[in-house]
Amino acid sequence: MPVVPPYVPFEYINMYLPVIYTGLIIGFFSLMAIAMEKRDIHILILTDLVGFAMILIVASVGTDLAESFILPGLVVELAEILAISEILISREMRKIQSKDMNKSLSPMDMTYDMEILTTAPNFIALVLLAFGVFLTGFTGGAVAGGGILLYIFSRKTRGLPVVEIEGISGISGLGWCMWIIGFCIFFLMPQYWLLSLFLAAGGLMLKVATKMGIIGILMREEYGKK
Amino acid sequence: MAFGDIVLYINPFHLFMFVTMLVFTFLIAIGRTETQVEAELGTLDDKTKKVDLKEFKARRFLSIICGIATAGAMITGDLYNLTLFMSLIGILNIGIISSVKQVEVLDSVFQYGLIAMMCSLPLFGGAALILGACGTVSLLAIQSIKPTAMMIFGAILMFIGACGESGIAPFFASKAEMFRTPGSPFLLIVHLSSLFIIIRVIEVLLIICT
């Protein structure tokens, strides 16, 4: 049977069962809320709550293997909620189009012209990108991705050139390759651990940053067509 | 052949399922989509529902990935990988069908996607509980551990999760309407993956509970 190492504080061990109960209770109540709710968009948002309860239960174990369960769990939840919301959007668009072919599908008109949207984003995005590169790794990727997202959302939501978007996806793929190569070097040639560590950190930063950037593409595809 | 401390856990049953799944994946990869022909009421005309090339390519890609993921779930000896492959199959099943144009089918995919999302709670939660109770996710190591109450609870949770992700019996109602869209060979992988996955999950749960 597994043995909990003696240096783990007593409070942490005591938290194991209460956290599992909390997760199950949150999941149960979210399911009840989903059963009572009638509108699809609310059901989708409530379903995400069940995902948070899942992360609670996995986090209660609290080892490094459990952490490696949390990451794919989060990614799966994100991917599924993106896919399902896309399905919801395209279904509603088809419903509207079957009634009236000429109706505009944009949720709101984005023709406003504010000075702050043309001057500030460059600077803030640059600062965020530089800070993200300085941090590297997962956190840096999230910060740099926030910068890219801010830039895309505020300046080029309508009609960002296709070349830029494919470039972002390409960089994302390169970051992925760097991460995988770093991972392989770590196993095959452990003496080059520093190189593989930096490869993985840089690759992860590129990957997470461009993943945030790709969310901007979704905006373009749905609402960018005029 | 040894890769560090990696221990391979394979028996003939896994190999058989793995090869069968790969053969099916190959057959689906070289297949072409069907074209549904519907007779119309009142006239002698037929209505054909075709799948255009772009949609065909996207679906073929997703089906091949789904087949490979199922084959991977057949041969893995690790609870962690099995969980990940299962959730990957759930996403891919949504993806294969989500590009259709019929509103009813999209409705059904939406319901199935919600079920798959909710069932990631028991799936990952069960795997984490088993990890917490055993201290390992290797099936080879779990085989020799006597089952405790927490392990059996985790196994039950995992079974619920697998049912939801692959959309079998209690949740099939959400999935049934999905198959009324053209594109037969690629839709078959949705059925096939859920059948294979459930066999493998029952085997894994028997390993955990005995």
Image (tube, coloured by chain):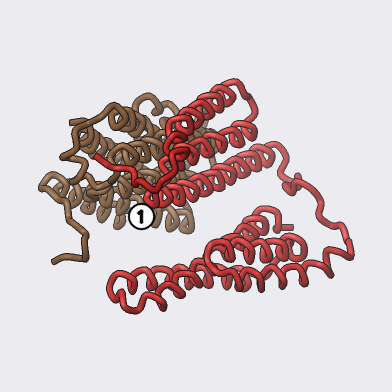
Across and down, in percent, residue A76 comes to 47, 47
Across and down, in percent, residue B74 comes to 23, 47
Q: Nearer the viewer, residue B41 or B30?
A: B30
Q: Amino acid at mark 1?
A: Ile
Would residue B50 be seen by someone viewing this image from the given angle?
no
* Display colour for chain B: brown
The residue under the point 44% across, 34% down is A14
Q: Which residue is mark 1?
A: B65
The residue under the point 70% across, 58% down is A224
Which quadrant of the figure contains the N terminus of chain B?
bottom left
Q: How many residues crowd mark 1 within 10 Å: few (<14), some (14–19), many (20+)?
A: some
> In which chain is the residue bearing label 1?
B
Q: Nearer the viewer, residue A195 or A82?
A: A195
Residue A56 against residue B170 in the figure, above or below: below
Residue A183 against residue B6 in the figure, above or below: below
Q: Residue furthest left?
A: B12
Left or right for A117, reference A186: right
Residue B108 against residue A131 in the figure, above or below: above
Left or right for B41, reference A131: left
Across and down, in percent, residue B53 comes to 46, 58
Would residue B129 be seen by someone viewing this image from the given angle?
yes
Splitting the image into 4 quarters, where does residue B210 fall?
top left
* Display colour for chain A: red
The residue under the point 29% across, 43% down is A3
